[in-house]
Structure formats: C-alpha cells, structure tokens
Image (cartoon, rainbow, N blue to C red):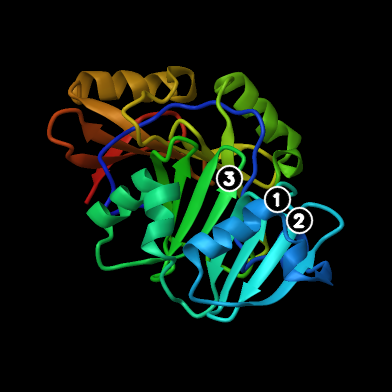
Amino acid sequence: MKMYKNISTVFFAVLVAMGFAGCSNHNDDINHPDGDTIEASALPQASRTTLNTYFNDATITSARRSGSANIYGSIYKALLSNGFEIDFDKDGLWTEVESEKNLPIPSKFFEDQLPEIQAYIEANYARSHVVEIEREQFGFTVELDNGIDLVFDREQRFIGIDLDDNDDDEIRIPLEQLPEKARMFLSTSFSGAKAITIKKDRDDNETTFEVYLDNGIKVQFNEGGDWIEIESKRNVIIPAALIPTTIAAYILQSYPAYAVKEIEKNRNGSFTIEIQHTSTGLDLELDFDANGNFVRVDD
C-alpha cells in the first residue's frame, strides 16, 4: 500500500467515462510518432505564438508533422535548440512539453497556462522543478526533476502522485484497452466520473492497470480486470458496497471517527484497510482475513 508525502490531506470518490494518459519516455511508437519534417513556418499559428511567447530564447531546430494523432491528440512537434520538445494538436494547442536536458519549464508558461498547478508545486515541492507536462483529455500529468509524477484534473486540482512512473515496463493506454471487466466495474461503481490517466504495468510477469479518476480516486486492477486496490484522496467516502459488510461494521464500531481512505484486496483474499481520522488526519492500517475478521493493526 503506497503512502504519499507532501500532498493535501484530502479524499475522493469515483466515476469513469473515457481515459487518456501518457508519458513521453514510455512506448514512443504509441505516444510520439515522429512524422515528416516540415518547415517551422508550416506549424499552426497558435503553435508559433506559444513558442515565441515562452521559448523565445531558443530556435527551432526541427519541426515535424504526423499523419495521425497520438494518445494526446498530438500532430505537430517542435524541437528547440535548448533541448525542449513541444507537441501540438491539429489546431496548434500545446499537448506535451518536455525538457530533454532536465531544465525547468519556464515559469511564465505556468503563470499563464497553469497557475493553480504552479501554486500547488511551489507549496509542496519547492525544491523541485517541472521537466515535463502532458495535457490529457480530462487533466494534466506533471513530471518533476526527481522523477515524481503528479496528476491533476481539468480544473488543475491535485488528484494523486505516482512514484513509479519511470518504470520502463509501464505505458499509458486509452480506456478501450482496459479489460472489459474493469471498465464495467468503473461504469457501475463510479458512473459519471472520467479517467484522467490509465497506466498498464508489466512487472515480474504480472500485468496490472492503474486508473486515476477526475474526482481523485485511484483504482488498481489485475490482468483479469478485478479491482485490487481503491484509494481516495478528496474526503469522499469510498462506496460502502465495495467494503465487506463485516469490515465496515468493525470500523464503524471500533473507529467511529475514522473514514476509509484505501482498501486493498490481497492475493490470499485478505484485506488491508487504511483509515484516517476525520479531524486529526492520523492514519491507521488494519488487517482483516478473507472472511472480514479483524486480525491486527499494522505498525
């Protein structure tokens, strides 16, 4: 069970419709089609305006146009002399900004384009800087120079943190590539929400999927599409139907001032539940067996 640092103590519930996600250092064939070389003047006017406004200290060393959009809707790519790569959609709206030399994305870019995200990073990661940002259909993914990925919704509200995004076995996928059983679970348990990012991870011959929803819920599925972990960060209660009745009753009786923050279904059928005090923010982890009987409090 992951514990996150430097994040607001908030929870959240769940919904799903369509999902996008991506990280430019994974699966380049899917996320970064190179396309044909074009003249810089052939970039859309909106693209050239963005480059002139925020990257006017560099020159365009290469411009490219792809015949089809990638998972972000990117069609155009501009490579700059300072090591930045900026992708744009068919209308010239930026979709991805990446620093190949680990340089910070210009602060003016954030001030104008993403002020709420900038404020969150300054408040929680003051010693880090942003080296990559992706505009997804329902939000944004921001990578810091320390390798941490932060996920935000369309209104630039913080959703979650991903410490493992540099895993070479991890790729972004669209919703339709999520197992059907997982999609059905999302549509029935969290109807109405939208997936900001969906990741597929292959580790030790095991495939798992992580879905970040725009209301702050993260759901992890196994290869068969069964949920194995649900985590909330926006003070929204995880649906009671997902918590075994015996476990819910025990928590209500023994920890009435706590709310369920995370539920993990282990391979042996047992459960690990993370609860948080609604006033103090104190976290506790409780272990239950496969029948929902309390086992112990984890240290």
Q: At numbered mark 1, what does the secondary structure look like: helix, strand or loop?
A: loop
Q: At numbered mark 3, what does the secondary structure look like: helix, strand or loop?
A: strand
Near mark 2 (Cα within 10 A), the count class, few <14, some 14-19 or many ≥20, is many
Looking at the image, residue 192 lies above or below residue 90: above
Near mark 3 (Cα within 10 A), the count class, few <14, some 14-19 or many ≥20, is many
Q: Earlier in the sequence, mark 1 or mark 2?
A: 2
- The amino acid beneath tag 1 is Asp
- The amino acid beneath tag 2 is Ile
Residue at the (72%, 55%) spot, across then down: 44
Residue at the (48%, 63%) spot, across then down: 54
Q: Quick check: 276 left or right of 89?
A: left
Quadrant of the rendered image containing residue 38: bottom right
Q: Which mark is residue 197?
A: 3
Q: Earlier in the sequence, mark 1 or mark 3?
A: 1
Looking at the image, residue 240 lies above or below residue 30: above
Residue at the (29%, 23%) spot, across then down: 250
Closer to us: mark 3 or mark 2? Answer: 2
Q: CA distance from mark 3 to mark 2?
A: 20 Å
Q: CA distance from mark 1 to mark 3?
A: 18 Å
Is residue 171 visible to the viewer in this orientation of the structure? no
Image position, residue 255 (x, y; %)? 20, 26
Q: Quick check: 198 left or right of 34?
A: left
Q: Are marks 1 and 2 in contact (CB under 8 Å)?
A: yes
Q: Which mark is residue 75?
A: 2
Q: Nearer the viewer, residue 147 or 135?
A: 135
Q: Nearer the viewer, residue 142 or 118?
A: 118
Q: Earlier in the sequence, mark 3 or mark 2?
A: 2
Residue placed under numbered mark 1 in the picture: 89
